[in-house]
Image: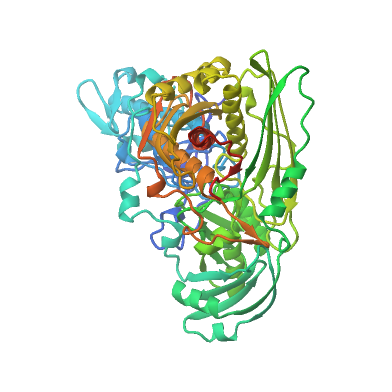
């Protein structure tokens, strides 16, 4: 490759040029992208142009799929705009730690704002993939930037680059001279070949990565400085709410909006595919006008169905199991899992400003590029004319893979000819939001000679049918076909799985851990029952049959830390489970007090995980704690009922997700040391936690739980 520095185009300063990494140690120069119009959000960080658009201060741009851009300001702040969504999982902190580690910058000087929707690259947040996908590119980006800064300082001082070192945002010479990164960034951005290696550090030299670290945005979150979509002051955006049908995907027959339009503060009433929107001066005015609408609805397509009928159809749709091996005995179980809502603390909110020739939106999205394309199609614009600013979210659990609220906001803005801030109510979110599909599982372990010689699971789940009445499905739900069985975690001989399904016109979406939360839970319950049928201790049985050392290591850790097998009072017991996914392993031990079987309480949870290098062990501990809460919730008490085509629950009062009174009195997380590159962790703990709680309940009560949640 030509390593000479090209002449910049006329009228473009050299400071406006970007340095693009096209290989590990190969650099070239490319002209910057055209600058974009600044956001109309007053003081809204998500609206700032991307550093790659501005050019000034940009030190290095990765040419990999992540398209990361590292900018150093004159004040020494390091800015990397993140092509992922921050939904509470702490990815901004983890990436800031990667950058600070390789750049030798102070963590307090690293800022990780969220990137707008792009035209190419990877902006998908899901599948527990964010840390693992960014670990290499982010560290390489920072290592390249550090090498360029050191080279720039060496040439300024006429010293050998190898004699310089970096610390706390400074390049330091042997004689004590220092230069801030900000003072070097302009000259560093013009360097093509560095005088020192630009390779990331080995794990043995890590001083930031692997150290338990408080989230970089923790203070902003607890003091209210952190901005969510509902906090943004976009010029002229008016509060908007939607009246929705009493049944899932019911159809609007007629609307009389005269009384609503006459109310104070009301600006517009807009019909949508799924309801009627009211635009007003305040949310109070909007809700009051919504309730004043006189609406006639036709029942939705599920009006004849309730839980009992859906469960019967699911059971009938489970594919038949194979013929078991000759001479074996069978341990079997059939399991039913209810629908579960995501119910993030922050309800869906989107701000939209749609004009005849362009559109601009602000909302949290795990799939912003798909969202931009869908919005463009909905309002009749080219995708290039739609700008999506990704905001932080107060929880997701998979909900923000979909972008229902953004499409609604765009349609209302276009019809009302003004910017709008559309917010779903809690009732909207639970009764009309997307949910984890209900499913039925049939599991069979064939035992011969004291060991499992075949293990099979067949399932059926609800998949989403599009009836033309509402928004098209936006993906995230597995259709019928081969089951991604996780039974291969054990040496169980022939392991197989299959799945079927039924189609219902209801909004479904990927819920944290997707299939594994039910598939693995059902399997681990049967593993406990196999151990019991053989007269074996559940932990000892697993130890002799687990395939991997990491799985045995996490199991051993929870067993020792949780004092597995110790004497407990009547009605209380321990349960254990193991899971492997995303290149990581986890085990969970749960203790439960089920002396009142109708009101069980998990009193203690011990979890152990091997995720490779844990970038931020404190963040991982928080993820595991959240997973334990999810397992407690969906196994013991939290689910959604369907009554004649409508969701019965409508708030946190009746969607009984675990609260403080349901949380374990004691929680421990043990992170096993590793030098492997990071695996996934965000969804990892849910299947193990769910199964451990179920197994603890079974041992405490002497029952065989088959329907979840247990107190549904």
| Residue with the most extreme left position | 176
Report the number of discs.
Answer: 0
Locate residue 641: give its quadrant. bottom right
Coloring scheme used: rainbow
Q: In the figure, is residue 683 to the left or right of 336?
A: left
- Residue 424 appears in the rendering: no
Foreground of the two, 173 or 86: 86
Q: Quadrant of the N terminus?
A: top right
**Above or below for 673 versus 9:** above
**Above or below for 236 versus 176:** below
Q: Position of residue 706 (x, y in %)?
A: 61, 40
Q: Position of residue 652 (x, y in %)?
A: 47, 57
| Residue with the most extreme front position | 570
- Residue 180 appears in the rendering: yes
- The residue located at (44%, 52%) in the rendering is 394
**Above or below for 104 versus 234:** above
| Residue with the most extreme top position | 449
Q: Position of residue 609 (x, y in %)?
A: 45, 27
Q: Position of residue 38 (x, y in %)?
A: 46, 58
Foreground of the two, 275 or 548: 548
Locate residue 570: give its quadrant. top left
- The residue located at (55%, 63%) in the rendering is 428
Q: In the figure, is residue 91 to the left or right of 410?
A: left
């Amino acid at each position: 490759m030509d390593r000479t520095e090209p002449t910049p185009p006329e009228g473009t300063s050299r400071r406006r040029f970007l340095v693009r990494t096209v290989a590990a140690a190969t650099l070239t120069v490319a002209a910057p992208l055209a600058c974009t119009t600044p956001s109309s959000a007053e003081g809204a960080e998500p609206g700032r142009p991307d550093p790659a658009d501005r050019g000034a201060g940009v030190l290095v741009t990765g040419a990999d799929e992540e398209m990361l851009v590292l900018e150093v300001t004159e004040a020494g702040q390091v800015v990397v705009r993140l092509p992922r969504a921050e939904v509470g999982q702490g990815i901004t902190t983890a990436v800031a730690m990667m950058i600070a580690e390789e750049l030798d910058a102070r963590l307090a000087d690293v800022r990780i704002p969220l990137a707008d929707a792009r035209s190419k690259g990877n902006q998908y947040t899901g599948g527990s993939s964010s840390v693992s996908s960014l670990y290499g590119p982010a560290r390489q980006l920072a290592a390249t930037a550090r090498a360029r800064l050191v080279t720039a300082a060496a040439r300024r001082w006429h010293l050998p680059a190898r004699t310089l070192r970096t610390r706390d945002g400074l390049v330091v010479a042997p004689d004590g001279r220092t230069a801030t990164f900000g003072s070097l960034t302009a000259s560093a951005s013009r360097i093509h070949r560095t005088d020192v290696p630009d390779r990331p550090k080995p794990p043995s030299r890590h001083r930031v990565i692997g150290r338990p670290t408080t989230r970089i945005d923790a203070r902003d979150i607890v003091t209210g400085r952190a901005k969510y979509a509902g906090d943004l002051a976009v010029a002229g955006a008016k509060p908007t709410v939607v009246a929705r049908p009493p049944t899932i995907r019911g159809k609007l027959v007629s609307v009389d909006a005269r009384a609503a339009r006459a109310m104070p503060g009301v600006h517009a009433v807009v019909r949508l595919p799924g309801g009627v929107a009211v635009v007003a001066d305040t949310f109070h005015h909007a809700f009051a006008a919504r309730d004043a609408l006189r609406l006639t609805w036709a029942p939705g397509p599920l009006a004849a169905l309730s839980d009992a009928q859906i469960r019967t159809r699911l059971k009938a749709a489970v594919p038949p199991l194979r013929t078991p091996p000759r001479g074996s005995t069978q341990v079997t179980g059939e399991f039913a899992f209810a629908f579960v809502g995501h119910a993030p603390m922050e309800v869906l909110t989107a701000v939209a400003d749609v004009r005849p020739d362009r559109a601009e939106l602000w909302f949290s999205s795990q799939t912003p590029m798909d969202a931009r394309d869908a919005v463009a199609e909905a309002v009749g614009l080219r995708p290039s004319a739609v700008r999506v600013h990704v905001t932080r979210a107060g929880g997701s659990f998979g909900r923000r893979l979909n972008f229902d609220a953004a499409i609604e906001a765009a349609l209302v803005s276009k019809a009302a000819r003004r910017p709008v801030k559309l917010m779903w109510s809690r009732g909207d979110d639970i009764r009309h939001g997307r949910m984890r599909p209900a499913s039925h599982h049939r599991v069979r372990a064939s035992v011969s000679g004291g060991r499992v010689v075949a293990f099979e699971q067949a399932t059926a789940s609800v998949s989403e049918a599009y009836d033309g009445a509402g928004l098209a499905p936006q993906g995230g739900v597995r259709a019928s076909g081969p089951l991604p069985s996780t039974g291969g975690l054990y040496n169980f001989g022939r392991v197989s799985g299959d799945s079927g399904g039924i189609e219902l016109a209801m909004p479904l979406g990927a819920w944290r851990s997707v299939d594994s939360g039910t598939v693995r839970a059902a399997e681990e319950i049967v593993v406990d029952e196999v151990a019991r049928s053989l007269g074996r201790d559940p932990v000892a049985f697993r130890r002799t049959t687990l395939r991997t050392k990491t799985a045995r290591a996490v199991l051993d850790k929870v067993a020792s830390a949780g004092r597995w097998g110790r004497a407990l009072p009547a009605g209380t017991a321990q349960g254990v489970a193991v899971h492997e996914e995303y290149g990581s392993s986890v085990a969970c031990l749960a203790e439960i007090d089920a002396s009142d079987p109708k009101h069980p309480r998990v009193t203690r949870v011990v979890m152990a995980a091997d995720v490779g290098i844990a970038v931020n062990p404190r963040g991982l501990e928080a993820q595991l704690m959240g997973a334990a809460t999810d397992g407690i919730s969906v196994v013991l008490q939290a689910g959604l009922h369907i009554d004649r085509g409508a969701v019965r629950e409508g708030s946190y009062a009746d969607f009984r997700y675990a609260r403080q009174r349901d949380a374990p009195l004691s929680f421990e997380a043990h992170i096993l040391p590793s030098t492997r590159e990071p695996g996934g962790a965000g969804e990892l703990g849910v299947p193990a936690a769910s199964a451990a709680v179920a197994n603890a309940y079974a041992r405490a009560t002497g029952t065989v739980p088959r329907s979840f949640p247990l107190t549904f």
